[in-house]
Amino acid sequence: MTSPARQLFGTDGIRGVAGEFPLTAESTFLIGRALGHDLGRTNPHPRVLIGQDTRESSRWIADRIALGLASRNVEVHSAGVITTPGVAYLARSRKFDAGVVVSASHNPWTDNGIKVFSGNGFKLPDSHELAIEQEIFSLLQTRESHREPDSKPAPTLPGEHGLRAAYIDWLAKNIPTDLSGLRVLVDCANGAATAEAPELFRACHIQATFMHAAPDGKNINENCGALHPETVAKQIASAKGTFDLGVTFDGDADRALFSDAGGRVINGDAVLLLAARDMQARGVLPGATTGATLGGEQSGHIIFRDGEATTGDGLLTALRVMEVMARSGKSFAELIGDLKMLPQRIQNVRVREKVPFDDVPAVKGAIEAAQRELDGNGRVVVRYSGTESLARVMVEAESEEKMHALTDGIAAAIKEDLGLRD
């Protein structure tokens, strides 16, 4: 029997336009209230941590969630502006029952989102998200039964500095290597990284120059950040030898992209190669990634599981890259000089519903046929968007002709069985 589908939560939590459902003043209060009720099933006195990015709407959304939580007698703490992985780390290390992040990552400032971590620092289980959704819709039908409390919790901004300091201290202690010789240009995307990156890099004695580190509520990701890594790359190229590395974060700093000293953009695949080689050489890559100690994707979202991290962390990724460079005495370009990049294409297909691909024979067959055709010389990744009614088809192949043919074949199968009808 197929489990009920979630309507609000995608793979990255709840996303939408701030001020529109499900991110209205009422619905965000109800999200907090429903989360508090869910947590109360296992702990009569739950504690929740809230963090947010720099969007204009993040403050009021975080305050409304806090009010909803407080209405269910939840003890609420705020870390203020902090990265998404910072909330995940603190939820686990400080033994909160959950951590809530208000952010829409790389999206425009008009969007926002809500992501919930369990007390173990991992994403909230699907069953809990479904239970919260069902309660939200139930509450919307019975508005009079859940009046807002008269007393309000403390504002979520500026938040508790000690929480942010604990996260920065943990990151700094992850890197025992001397990084003081590195000259780095850092793009903070006018986002959450502006609250932690400068202090962290100072603590690690990195010679860092920061750009896009003056958020005004509306300039997050605006012509900067991980969607525009060429911004840092061009500045490094024009500076001619001034910098050893460029680092570009996205709005909530759960991922990072890089530029080498020559101004070439370096994506997540190159970071995985650099990190895997280093970890294998140090004997901390058991099973050559089966297990899995290291994971990631081209977008720069990298997960290191040889420590306490539970999710991708752009700040940690940047430190790990710099650590390998400092320890080896080699430039980024030298460390990944033999990387072979295959042509890649991503095609989006709008769908009616997100049915598991294994449950659609024609789609499953098209994916498997493409994988046989590649025979290990490339890759196929097909997944649903976490925030839109889209299937994303990504194919890498040795030739552009094969890449296009395989992408078109899979996309056609999805359109035929799952695509929108005219």
Image (cartoon, helix red, strand yellow):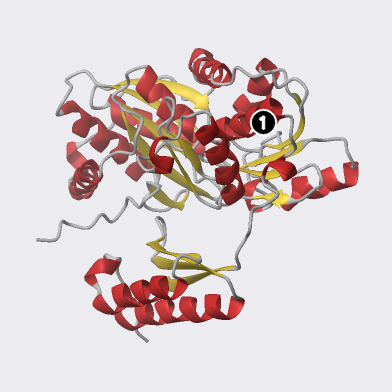
- The answer to whether residue 248 shows anywhere in this view is yes
Quadrant assignment for the C terminus: bottom left
Q: What element carries label 1?
A: helix
In terms of depth relative to the viewer, which is nearer, 216 or 145? 216
Residue drawn at point x = 32 percent, y = 50 percent: 9
Q: Is residue 415 above or below residue 199?
A: below
Q: What residue type is labelled 1?
A: Met
Q: Is residue 123 above or below residue 134?
A: above
Residue drawn at point x = 43 percent, y = 81 percent: 409
Outermost residue to the bottom: 422
In terms of depth relative to the viewer, which is nearer, 410 or 218? 410
Q: Name the residue under label 1.
A: 322
Outermost residue to the top: 162
Question: Residue 43 lies in what quarter of the image?
Answer: top left
Q: Answer left or right for 368 relative to 102.
A: left
The spot of residue 401 in percent (x, y) is: 58, 81
The spot of residue 420 in percent (x, y) is: 36, 79
Quadrant assignment for the N terminus: bottom left
- The answer to whether residue 109 shows anywhere in this view is no
In terms of depth relative to the viewer, which is nearer, 135 or 60? 135
Q: In this view, does 173 lie above or below 234?
A: above
The spot of residue 173 in percent (x, y) is: 55, 16
